[in-house]
Image: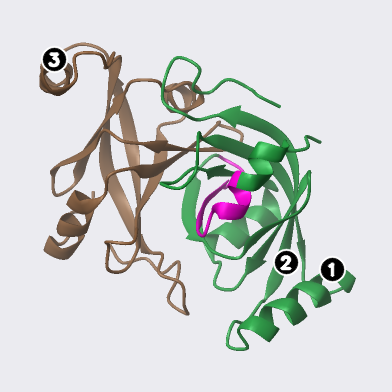
Chain colours: A green, B brown
Amino acid sequence: MAGLTKEMKEAFGKMKIFPVATATKDGTPNVVPIGVVELVSDDTIWITDNFMNKSLENLKSNPKIALYVWGPEIKGCFQVKGHATVKTSGRDFDEMKATLNKKNPALPARSLIIVKITDVFECQPGPNAGNKIL
Amino acid sequence: MAGLTKEMKEAFGKMKIFPVATATKDGTPNVVPIGVVELVSDDTIWITDNFMNKSLENLKSNPKIALYVWGPEIKGCFQVKGHATVKTSGRDFDEMKATLNKKNPALPARSLIIVKITDVFECQPGPNAGNKIL
């Protein structure tokens, strides 16, 4: 597991929509914008599945996931890779659903994707792009 | 192959940075923001590799690629999947390099990724998310 630095956590908190990538077991990538993505500790991200389709299917057979933190308001760029577990019941799922539906009762909050961060890579364009940071 | 509609092409042209996903052959996804991405015909995208690392390695062994078109200035959201060929010489490569270096001589323009679009999927949040459009 890899824990994000203070600067990374601040940048993470500024993101509104995350590009989230998954893949089939035989390597067909999928990438979609996802809004309900929350860093719940230094090394754990909770993603709410409201309308996932291929992403969810992919994660059920292949738990590898990637996303990046970058945008007009973010200094630098880093890509997070992790290992995802899909929950549709239990304490964490109930907590996510209650919190989300308090803000927006219309969202289905069908499942909770718990991501343990395994690696962090530089993604700012330049000679260091792709380097492993954590 | 799938050819984008007029509306999709207009949206594509408004994007400044694209989230581009690739994967290893055994399904580890990678996603990074890439700037030099151009729709050269209804079904063909040219991506310039300036600083690719894992993306390029992935594409050499597994040509599957995905990206989406969405942002504050874009109406709707669509994900494009395609098949990539990496070129480091030839007429298309020379044309890409000459055009890019005319605008920005500092960019290395190391390779040209030619993507033939195979599928297009809806990625606007909601009940139709994930549906195949083309």
> Residue placed at 78% from the left, 37% from the top?
A3
Instruction: Give the distance between the C-alpha atoms of the residues marked 2 and 1, in whole angstroms.
Output: 8 Å
Q: Are marks 2 and 1 in contact (CB under 8 Å)?
A: yes
Q: Is residue B14 above or below residue A99?
A: above
Instruction: Give the distance between the C-alpha atoms of the residues marked 2 and 3, in whole angstroms.
Output: 47 Å
User: Residue A119: within the magenta?
Assistant: no
Query: Quadrant of the rendered structure where residue B110 is?
Result: top left
Q: Is residue A85 above or below residue B65?
A: below
User: Residue A22: within the magenta?
Assistant: yes
Instruction: Give the distance between the C-alpha atoms of the residues marked 3 and 1, in whole angstroms.
Output: 54 Å
Dot 1 amino acid type: Asp
Dot 2 amino acid type: Leu
> Residue placed at 32% from the left, 58% from the top?
B120
In the rendered image, residue A45, in percent from the top left (x then y), is placed at 72, 53
Is B123 left, or right, of B118 in this rendering? right
Tag 1, which secondary structure? Answer: helix
Q: Are marks 3 and 1 in contact (CB under 8 Å)?
A: no
Residue B4 showing in the rendered view: no
Whether callout 2 and callout 1 share a subunit is answered: yes
Tag 3, which secondary structure? Answer: helix
Looking at the rendered image, the disc whose residue lies closer to the viewer, 3 or 1, is 1
In the rendered image, residue A104, in percent from the top left (x then y), is placed at 60, 84
Quadrant of the snapshot with the N terminus of chain A: top right
Label annotation for residue A92: 1
> Residue placed at 46% from the left, 30% from the top?
B62
Q: Which range of residues does the magenta coloring cover?
A: A11-26
What subunit carries mark 1? A
Q: Which residue is mark 3?
A: B94
Whether callout 2 and callout 3 share a subunit is answered: no
Residue A112 showing in the rendered view: yes
